[in-house]
Image (cartoon, rainbow, N blue to C red):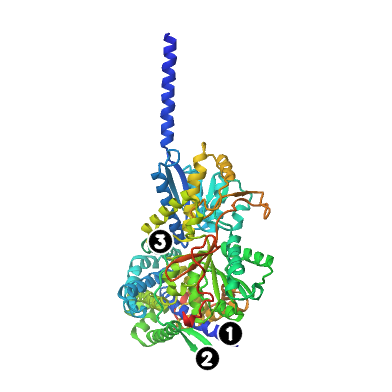
Amino acid sequence: MTTLGQLVLSGIFIGGIYALMSMGLTLIFGVLRIVNFAHGEFLMLAMYGAWAITKMLGLNPYFAALAIVPAMFLFGAVVHQVIVRPALDKPHLVGVFATMGLSILMQNAALMVMTADLWDVPPIFGRSVEVGPFYFKAELLLGFAVTILCSLFLQWLIRSTYLGKAIRATVQDGEAAMLMGIPVPRIFLITFASGSALVGLSACMMMPLFSVFPTVGLNFVLIAFVIVVLGGMGSIEGALIGGMCLGVVQSVSSYYVAPAYGQMFYFVLFLLVMIFRPNGLLGQKGAATIGIND
Amino acid sequence: MRKWLRLGACLIATSFAFMAEDRSQAQEPIRIGVLLPLTGPFAKNGIENWEAMQIARDMINERGGINGRKIEYVNGDATSPAAAISETERLITKDGVKITTGSFASPLAIAVSQAAERQGVFHWETTGAAEIITRRGFKYTFQVGAPARRYGQVAVDFIIEDLSKRLNKSVNDLRIALLWENRAFGKSVGDGIRAYTGQKNIKPVYDEGYDQFSTDMTPIVQKLKDVKPDILIAISFPNDAILFQRKAKELDFNVAAFIGVSAGYSSPDLRNSIGSMVNGIFVADFPPKVNPDVLNPEIRKVADEFYKRYEAKMKRPPAGHAAAGFSAIWALFTDVLPKAKTFEPDELRDIALKLDLPEGSLVNGSGIKFTNFDWPDDPKDAGQNLRASIGVWQWTPEANEQVFPAKLATHAPAMVPLPDWSKR
């Protein structure tokens, strides 16, 4: 029982970290309806940033978020203007290839600049937190807490602010929104940049848990895609629940079946959800074309 | 008289022509195709190998080359098995290389040797290990490094001959767990250990494979914690090794001895990543540096120069695979190529098969004697070096020390039993 408890709780917490990383992707997909294949590389870039700030200034990687989040917002804005915007009104494949190309470019640039070395930040808390018979890394719990806060904030932003309303209007009908005076291109820009900023935040939360190297994004991007589709495309709370489901399934199946099959089992879950709830756990009908939930 | 003069002139002219041709041939470099992963996920180790190989090239060229001919490398970037095949074919068909070498990781070695064999090119594999590399009936593939099974066997031998005594338990009372990443290398080593422990009547209490790209080690560590092994043998790559050690600390999973097998546990990155957590971990691998007394006097000088140059260039001592890369390519330069006249693969193959170098002939303590479908252990094997040195070294607070087998050792094993995480 202790074992199962440890597995489920660890799965939920690590799933929270995955969810934070996927929120940017689901936000961008929900509004711009473009799949950012360079999402993993955005994560890699932000992790390098967090690592560099930690290393050079001797700061805690969580403080690095103060610099990394705005920096990734700017980076996202530039990528949007240069690469994404020109692809938006073109056939879908253009966006796929544009972001895929960016992904390969970023990976190889990282390899040239940073080499293939693995970089880490020293652990922040020396000991694990012991709760009864369970052990948790404090960094993991903190990351999970940030995920919850972040998803609450995003919910509030989308539901209760003017910007959120404008985003929802853009998602429902871009042309009508434009006629109502909503600057749709700017909404796209802000959304893409915010999605990137979210990746920046998750990178700062992940840096104390994982090493950074040029292909680190590949280890996570598949998980992010699964979570986004599982939770319902464009749904923030869906990403949260999808992330936790994936974390638990991966953890429990790896223990009780075999560690080599952890990935297989979350894909089984993924297929089941696709068969019985094609719009994802919390996605609305036609989510893939409608976008973000309102 | 005139006739004789004319004939003499002709002869002189012809001999001049021959001399000129001879000289041009003498100056023409020997080109070797080097297939290593210089980009992509294996680049880290690939680049370290490449540095070691460049040092070997520079050293041999500074000594005047091979029979007056300099060595020239032509590079191929073997990022993945598919890239390895196309890069090997490019070097052979476009650049015309007759000899290939490399390629660090087993899946790449399998691919490169296959492409080379198909084109009838001599391949001198430096560090690949998977058994299949030399078991496909290939004529021109020679693997200088130890086969995968030896990595595991030496770990088991270390337990039987050394650790069991230090832990005051008979081998059969020791609870041994085996954890392996489930791709070519990890699986091959895992299979080897399973077969070998079977022969020794040891039954591991845990034996599981896992995906090296896994992002959460909780289930693995939790299961091991429930199994309570005394000794864990793990075969991992760098990223998963780091994740595993951190998770082991997080979940307070302790063992009396931890033996990593090559790859991730031998990567110099490990200390940068997990700091002092690395101390005490044993690594079954190519020796990074052996007790110099086992080396023959001439190779000892070469070894000194190699270590000096490598440390000057890379600001740290070479890992085992880099030392193995140097050792293998140096043997090619000094024991194979000088005997060649045509450099055709059949000639090189004959030279390689005739090699009979005792242990201590290569910088990392290896000797060379290749199989040729004549190995009683496995008659399907051809081109595998039976005298490749392999041993166990340990991460210590200051450096890495060779601890097993005794004749290669520079240090006695320390930190046995391994202190619990709370005391480390």
Q: What residue is rendered at 69% in x and 65% in y?
A: B199
Chain ID at mark 3: A
Residue carrying label 2: A132
Quadrant position of residue A146: bottom left
Q: Position of residue B375 (x, y in %)?
A: 66, 51
> How far is mark 2 from mark 1, CA to CA?
12 Å
Q: Label 2 sits on what residue type?
A: Gly
Q: Residue furthest top?
A: B1
Residue A3 numbered tag: 1
Q: Does residue B68 lie above or below A230 as drawn?
A: above
Chain ID at mark 1: A
Quadrant position of residue A104: bottom left
Q: Nearer the viewer, residue B186 or A237?
A: B186
Name the front one of labels 2 and 3: 2
Residue carrying label 3: A108
Label 3 sits on a secondary structure element that is helix
> How far is mark 3 from mark 1, CA to CA?
41 Å
Whether residue A286 is visible: no
Q: Position of residue A290 (x, y in %)?
A: 46, 77
Q: Label 3 sits on what residue type?
A: Asn
